[in-house]
Amino acid sequence: MTTTTETLEYPILQETSEVKKEKRGFIEPKETINISSAKDFELTQLAAKGNMTAFEEVYNRHHRRVYSICLRMLQNTTEAEDLTQDVFIQLHRKIGSFRGDSAFTTWLHRLTVNQVLMHFRKRNVKFEKTTEEGETPVQVVSGTQNPRKMPVVDKIAIENAIEKLPNGYRNVFVLHDVEGYEHEEVARILGCSVGTSKSQLHKARLKLRKLLQKKAPPRLFGI
C-alpha cells in the first residue's frame, strides 16, 4: 500500500505520532483501504484504533479549515495557531466518539468552536480588533438587525455583560451576533434546533440590554 501525507505544520502532531505510540504501545494496524482516498469516517475509525497515519491524514485534510475558523473568531494569528493545535489534541482524545451521525466536518466544526468558546471564557471573553495605529480597539458586533458591523461604545461593558450570560445564551450570541453565523449554521454547530437558536438569541439580547442600558444605547445592538 502506498500512502502519501504532507509534512506536518504543527509540531504537536509529531509528538502525538511518535511519543504516544511508544507510551501506549500502539502498533500500526494493517489497513485494507488506501489512506489518501479513504472517507473521513473510515479515517476516524482507524485513528480511534491507534492508526496515526490515518490521524495525520485527518489533520492534513482539515487543519486549514480549523485554523480558518479559529482565526475568524480570534482575529489573532498566533492565538489561532495555538488553538488549532489544541483542537487537534482534543480531537485525538475524542475521535473515537465520532459515530458518523453527522458529517465529520460538521462535528469537527462544532468541536473547534467549542474549544474557542472555552478559550474566550478563560480570558474573560475579550473580542478585540487591533487597529493599525495600535490604539485601543473598538468592539465590533456583526449579524444584528443591521447586517453591517456595528460599533459598541464601551468595550469593557460588553465583555463583562457577555461573560454574565448563561452558557446557552452566550454561545448563541457569540456565534450569531459576534461571529456572524446564520441561525441554521448556529443550530448545526451547537446541535440544537433553529427555533432554539432564535429563542436563545432573543433572550440573550434582552438580558444584554438590561446589563448595558446604563452604559450604551440599546439601538447599538439592534435590539
Image: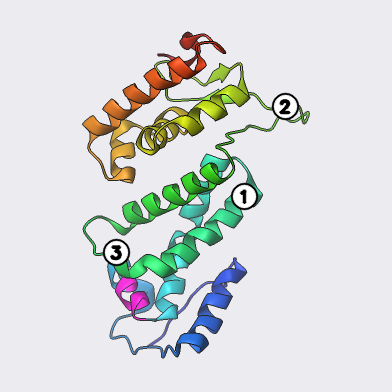
Does residue 43 lie above or below 61 as drawn? below
CA gap between label 3 and label 2 equals 42 Å
Amino acid type of the residue tagged 3 in the rendering: Phe
Q: Is residue 15 left or right of 223 when viewed as pictured? A: right
Would you name the residue on which mark 1 appears? 79
162 part of magenta stretch: no
Amino acid type of the residue tagged 2 in the rendering: Thr
Label total for image: 3
Specify the quadrant that holds the N terminus: bottom left
Would you name the residue on which mark 2 appears? 136
Does residue 69 lie above or below 54 as drawn? above
Position in image of residue 104 (x %, y %): 31, 59
Dominant secondary-structure state across the stretch colored magenta? helix
Density class for disc 3 (Cα within 10 Å; few <14, some 14-19, many ≥20) is: some
Does residue 211 lie above or below 100 as drawn? above
What SS does tag 2 mark? Answer: loop
What SS does tag 3 mark? Answer: loop
Which residues lie in the magenta part? 43-49
Q: Image point 48% across, 19% down: which residue?
A: 211
Q: Do the residues labelled 3 and 1 touch (CB within 8 Å)?
A: no
CA gap between label 3 and label 1 equals 26 Å
Q: In which quarter of the image is residue 129?
A: top right
Would you name the residue on which mark 3 appears? 98
Q: Can residue 72 be seen in this view?
A: no
Name which of mark 3 and mark 2 comes first in the sequence: 3
Name which of mark 2 and mark 1 comes first in the sequence: 1
Q: In which quarter of the image is residue 216?
A: top right
Amino acid type of the residue tagged 1 in the rendering: Glu
Q: Image point 43% across, 69% down: which residue?
A: 92
What SS does tag 1 mark? Answer: helix
Position in image of residue 84 (x %, y %): 53, 57
